[in-house]
Image (cartoon, helix red, strand yellow):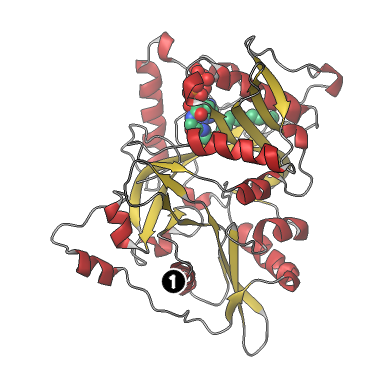
Amino acid sequence: MLGDGENPAESQNPDTEGGNSTIDALARKVHESLSLAKRHKFWETQPVGQFKDRGDASLSEGPIEPPTPLSEVKQEPYNLPGPYEWITCDMDSEEMCAEVYILLTNNYVEDDENMFRFNYSKEFLRWALRPPGYFRSWHIGVRVKSSKKLVAFITGVPAKIRVRDTVVTKAEINFLCVHKKLRSKRLAPVMIKEVTRRVHLENIWQAAYTAGVILPTPISTCQYWHRSLNPKKLIDVGFSRLGARMTMSRTIKLYKLPDSTVTPGFRKMELHDIPAVTRLLKNYLSQFVVAPDFDENDVDHWLLPKEDVVDSYLVESPETHEITDFCSFYTLPSSILGNQNYSTLKAAYSYYNVTTKTPLLQLMNDALIVAKRKDYDVFNALDVMQNDSFLKELKFGPGDGKLHYYLYNYRIKDVLRPSELGLVLL
Ligand code: MYA
């Protein structure tokens, strides 16, 4: 099933007792067994947790390197190979946005079997890349000088992220993409160094990112779970398989959902709900080790419903009119590669969910009902936050894609359990 990138050879589930030490041991073993040539030539030079430092109690938590004076930050862009040039992508421009969309549609993340490829919509990209306080200079493209064709991309957006008690403005790095024809030419490290330089120019020294590949060194490793909404299509396109001793009609029955939601007062979030939703989220997210520190502007941007981009629902108590619960998902279709009958898989991704009165299981079942009604084929969720408490019961199945979370220039002592993460990156 589709995850965010490849599924590394890892059979351990960190979300179990003793998971940290098992992962540490595994990481050390992998590191030791690699020949020098196979090591991370680029990542070993970067201020990130290194595999060899795992479990070293003398290293303290927090920034790995202090900020350098701004005057010492390199003023000119890094050198690109001769045929290429840097551009700053103006996502307000319809043409630019379309070029980025096409690059990603044809070259971005695929599953292990190359059956599906993320197909972020233009509207989604605009939303993801222009949050409050965004920097246009962090939307970086690489063009072929002669043809002007866009062949690589990387982005950052600023976000206040709390790690334990410390809130730091970090860059969230995403959409790193190199055209298929230009792979394995060490372009990615140059892109990463260039975005780092531009982030430093704004006096920001930390970053958060996720990837399907193992790099030095994950702060946590999560798993995607998938809830079939349209099982027949999912089976037809090879996203899922008919279970043993299951017929198609029994499978369809198994995943059937009621037509309407069950929680009284369940409705779409509206503009006037922003203060209440912000309060709910702030309270709720405070229990996690790593979480965004959302203010009302952030909630307006990230959680107010946007057609085919982000959906948010809440529970308004019919008696007191208090907002007691909240759930949300974002829309990220995938292209179905080489199928005669279908070209797109419509997927909803669980985003931020908060409960104070409604059982989470019931709230998420209502989210599934809404998603089904809106014609999504599948509802995906990571095992972050308290998601583990509803996944199995609501008939989500584990995917084979793992998603690793990383921090740049910030050391965390021990690997975190997914349930200690309160952060969802797009
Ligand atoms: S995750 C999504 C990544 N995109 C895709 O998977 C799309 C399809 N794949 C591609 O477009 C290419 O394969 C990419 C690599 C571009 C991924 N994150 O140029 P190369 C390292 C970080 O020869 P290519 C997302 O967007 C690799 O280990 N590093 O390789 C978050 C090796 O280094 P080392 C990665 O295949 C991105 C080097 O690149 C990734 O042609 C967060 C090889 O370079 C990866 N996903 O291109 C970026 N994949 O030798 C980090 C490979 O050391 C941000 N590599 O092992 C860091 C914070 C920066 C800001 C800091 C501010 C203070």
Q: Please identify the quarter of the rendering in which residue 88 is found.
A: top right
Q: Please identify the quarter of the rendering in which residue 198 is found.
A: top right
As drawn, which residue projects farthest toward the bottom?
Answer: 319
Give the residue at x 67% y 47%.
126
Give the residue at x 59% y 70%.
313
At mark 1, the secondary structure is helix
Asked if residue 162 can be seen in this view, the reply is yes
Give the residue at x 55% y 46%.
120
Q: How many marks?
A: 1
Relative to 69, is 221 on the left or the right? left
Give the residue at x 54% y 16%.
186
Report the front residue among 23 and 223.
Answer: 223
Is the CB atom of the residue marked by disc 1 within 8 angstroms of ligand 1's nearest atom? Answer: no
Relative to 102, is 37 on the left or the right? left
Residue type at mark 1: give it.
Asn
Near mark 1 (Cα within 10 A), the count class, few <14, some 14-19 or many ≥20, is many
As drawn, which residue projects farthest toward the right?
Answer: 71
- The answer to whether residue 163 is above or below residue 348 is above
Relative to 289, is 55 on the left or the right? left
The percent position of residue 271, horizontal first and vertical second, equals 73, 69
- The answer to whether residue 415 is above or below residue 270 is above
Asked if residue 414 can be seen in this view, the reply is no
The percent position of residue 86, horizontal first and vertical second, equals 70, 22
The percent position of residue 95, horizontal first and vertical second, equals 69, 39
Report the front residue among 313 and 292.
Answer: 313
Relative to 13, is 306 on the left or the right? right
Q: Which residue is mark 1?
A: 365
- The answer to whether residue 89 is above or below residue 231 is above
Q: Please identify the quarter of the rendering in which residue 177 is found.
A: top right
The percent position of residue 167, horizontal first and vertical second, equals 72, 45
